[in-house]
Amino acid sequence: RNEFCVVVDSNKLWRLSLEDKTASEMLGHTSAIQFVAYDPLGERLAIGDIGGETLIFDASSMRERLRLRGNSGAVSTIAFAPNDQTIATSNTTGDITLWDPVIGCVRGIIRVAKPITMLQFSPDAKALAAAANDGTINCWWSE
């Protein structure tokens, strides 16, 4: 895909196309949008908001596919596992939540106790790295 998204006025999501050089409003959201991420194939778009919700949309139609609730603070970052088995979100209080990407249930919570600024899965989806606002990086490996 030759497009990307930008947030305007904290709650409006716009799609910018590099192919036809157009911009279109995709979504007006009620809460301030904190983070936006595409899945590895560009088929889904995740939006994390200040209220702690993460919404997963079909990237083409912008139809809501899933709503992840349970973050205790504003969503600070979102990552999709490359194998499409997990979505990870973090919040401003330092919790990382691992979600089932099909039904939206919580698979696990990792408590870091400091604000997370970035999450990244390894290419084989067996490791998750988290960068905190104090400059530290933590990594976790699955079996």
Image (cartoon, helix red, strand yellow):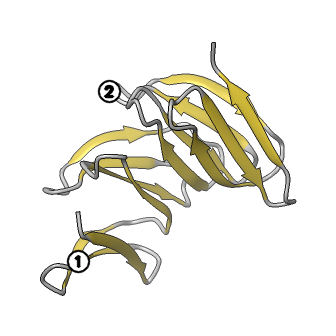
The reply to whether residue 52 is in sight is no
Using the image, determine if residue 85 lies above or below residue 138: above
Residue under numbered circle 1:
25
Quadrant of residue 25 within the rendered picture: bottom left
Q: Is residue 21 left or right of residue 68?
A: left
* Outermost residue toward the front in this view: 123
Question: What's the residue at 50%, 30% (across, down)?
Answer: 124
User: On residue 102, which mark appears?
Assistant: 2
Q: Nearer the viewer, residue 13 or 129?
A: 129
Question: Could you tell me residue 121's position as x and y percent?
Answer: 56, 39
Question: What's the residue at 23%, 55% (across, down)?
Answer: 59
Name which of mark 2 and mark 1 comes first in the sequence.
1
Q: Quadrant of the N terminus?
A: bottom left
Crowding at mark 1 (Cα within 10 Å: few <14, some 14-19, many 20+): some
C-beta proximity under 8 Å, tags 2 and 1 = no
How much space separates mark 2 and mark 1, taking CA atoms? Answer: 27 Å
Which amino acid type is marked by label 2?
Val
Q: Is residue 35 left or right of residue 93?
A: left
Question: What's the residue at 48%, 48% (across, down)?
Answer: 53
Using the image, determine if residue 23 lies above or below residue 109: below
Q: Nearer the viewer, residue 29 or 102?
A: 102
How many numbered marks appear? 2
Q: Quadrant of the C terminus?
A: top right
Using the image, determine if residue 115 lies above or below residue 126: below
Q: Nearer the viewer, residue 89 or 120?
A: 120
Which amino acid type is marked by label 1?
Glu
SS for tag 2?
loop
